[in-house]
């Protein structure tokens, strides 16, 4: 277990920053998911923490010690990659014991630990097989067992589930969560999958072109994104420009009561489509006209034109909604964020 602190970390490649002035703290025993578009610097961040590469500026602290210049093998940090990189000429048991052998731990201890990990990782009777004789999910379990054998303080997972089919992915996700619960190892998980990040992480860090945009609990990342970029990464969002004053948001001639906010002025409301319901117009005063409709299971995704704006909303399939219908919109303003202003409700 270990607390990680990154202080003003910067890494450039050929003059272009891959990581730019990132500072953050990851708590002892926390599972943090690192998300962001392809090329935003996620793997670079893991490589810096593991010691595989050196930063140009800034420092890395583990358990209160500055490890910026400490060699990778002395950091108690291990990394599991998307491609598991098992040694093809070693059996499963030999792969798991490899790191312990390098550390010259006694044979008996190695054998005991290997057996323990084979059980823990649900790899019964596979110890004598070679990596080429295993499924993708089994290979990833061996890769995890091999790094866990080293009793690391920090576990770095670089998209470990991305090459697996959905069933294996679910199983391994559950296993990683169980391991994290049992061992409480400080863990950073890089993932492209927003649901995976939401489901697994204590907190999510969102990166964008080498910078850290937001780090918060999954629910806050979802409901209170600090910017358009964060909002869009976690699902469909409507960005509605308007004027906010004294608990009233005005847009396209409509006035909405919203939870009291400290500041106001010209803002952009970020409203998730699942927080807008298409309803029958109230008092014969429709808000807009349906321009598009798509069925998705029990409900529909519906585009509604309101003045010059298009709202993407949800509608129940029990209520007759057709293109051209005049409708009202029921918006859950308690779950709306305004241009990065935190909702004070
Ligand atoms: N060894 C390198 N030499 C030059 N540029 C590099 C090197 N490694 C990474 N980069 C660049 O640094 C940036 C960040 O790369 P990185 O691999 O960290 O992104 P990522 O967020 O992990 O991407 P992905 O999700 O696609 O794996 C990219 O623009 C990449 O091209």
Image: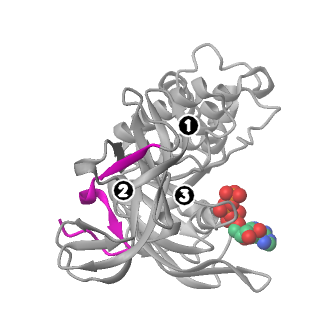
CA distance separating discs 1 and 2: 20 Å
Quadrant location of the C terminus in the rendered image: bottom left
What residue is shown with label 1? Answer: 294
**Ligand 1 quadrant assignment:** bottom right
Magenta stretch bounds:
325-345
Q: Based on the displayed image, in which of its 4 quarters is residue 30 positioned?
A: bottom left
Name which of mark 1 and mark 2 comes first in the sequence: 2
Q: State the residue at coordinates (71%, 23%).
A: 135
Residue 10 appears in the picture as rendered: yes
Residue at coordinates 24% horizontally, 58% vertically from top-left? Answer: 334
Q: Depth check: give the residue in front, 324 or 54.
A: 324
Q: Secondary structure at mark 1?
A: strand
Q: Residue at x 33, y 49 (%)?
A: 328
Give the image location of residue 183, x and y in percent: 38, 41
Give residue 186's position: percent from left, percent from top: 42, 54
The quadrant holding residue 87 is top right
* Residue 8 appears left or right of 133: left
Marks 3/1: CA–CA distance = 29 Å
Name the residue: 50% across, 52% down: 236
Q: State how the image is colored.
A: one colour
Q: Nearer the viewer, mark 2 or mark 3?
A: 2
**Closest to the observer: 202 or 223?**
223
Q: Earlier in the sequence, mark 3 or mark 1?
A: 3
Q: Determine which of the numbered discs, if any, sits on residue 287 in the image.
A: 2
Q: Residues within 10 Å of mark 1 (few under 14, many from 20)?
A: few
Circle 3 residue: 35
Image quadrant in which the N terminus is located: bottom left
Q: Position of residue 81 (x, y in %)?
A: 66, 48
The residue nearer to you, when weighing 64 against 18, is 18
Q: Tell me the crowding category of disc 3: few under 14, some 14 to 19, or many 20 or more residues within 10 angstroms, Cα based.
A: many
């Amino acid at each position: 277990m270990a607390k990680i602190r990154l202080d003003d970390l910067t890494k450039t490649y050929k003059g272009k920053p891959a990581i730019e002035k990132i500072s953050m703290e990851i708590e002892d025993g926390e599972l943090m998911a690192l998300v962001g578009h392809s090329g935003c610097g996620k793997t670079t961040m893991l490589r810096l923490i593991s010691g595989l590469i050196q930063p140009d500026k800034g420092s890395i602290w583990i358990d209160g010690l500055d490890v910026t210049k400490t060699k990778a093998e002395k950091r108690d940090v291990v990394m599991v990659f998307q491609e598991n990189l098992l040694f093809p000429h070693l059996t499963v048991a030999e792969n798991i014991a490899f790191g312990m052998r390098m550390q010259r731990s006694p044979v008996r201890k190695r054998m005991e630990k290997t057996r323990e990990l084979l059980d823990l990782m649900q790899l019964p009777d596979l110890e004598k097989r070679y990596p080429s004789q295993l499924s993708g999910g089994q290979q990833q379990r061996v890769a995890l067992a091999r790094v866990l054998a080293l009793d690391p303080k920090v576990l770095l997972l670089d998209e470990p589930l991305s090459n697996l089919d959905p069933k294996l992915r679910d199983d391994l996700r559950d296993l990683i969560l169980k391991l994290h619960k049992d061992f409480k190892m400080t863990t950073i998980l890089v993932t492209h999958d927003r649901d995976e990040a939401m489901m697994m992480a204590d907190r999510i860090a969102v990166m964008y072109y080498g910078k850290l945009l937001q780090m918060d609990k999954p629910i806050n990342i979802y409901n209170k994104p600090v910017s358009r970029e964060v909002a869009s990464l976690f699902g469909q969002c409507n960005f509605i420009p308007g004027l906010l004053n004294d608990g009233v948001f005005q847009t396209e001639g409509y006035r909405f009561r919203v939870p009291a906010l400290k500041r106001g002025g010209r803002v952009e409301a970020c409203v998730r489509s699942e927080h807008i319901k298409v309803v029958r117009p109230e008092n014969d005063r429709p808000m807009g006209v349906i321009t598009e409709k798509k069925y998705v299971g029990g409900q529909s995704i519906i585009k509604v034109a309101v003045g010059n704006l298009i709202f993407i909303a949800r509608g129940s399939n029990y209520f007759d909604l057709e293109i051209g219908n005049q409708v009202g919109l029921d918006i859950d303003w308690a779950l709306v964020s305004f241009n990065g202003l935190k909702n004070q409700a």
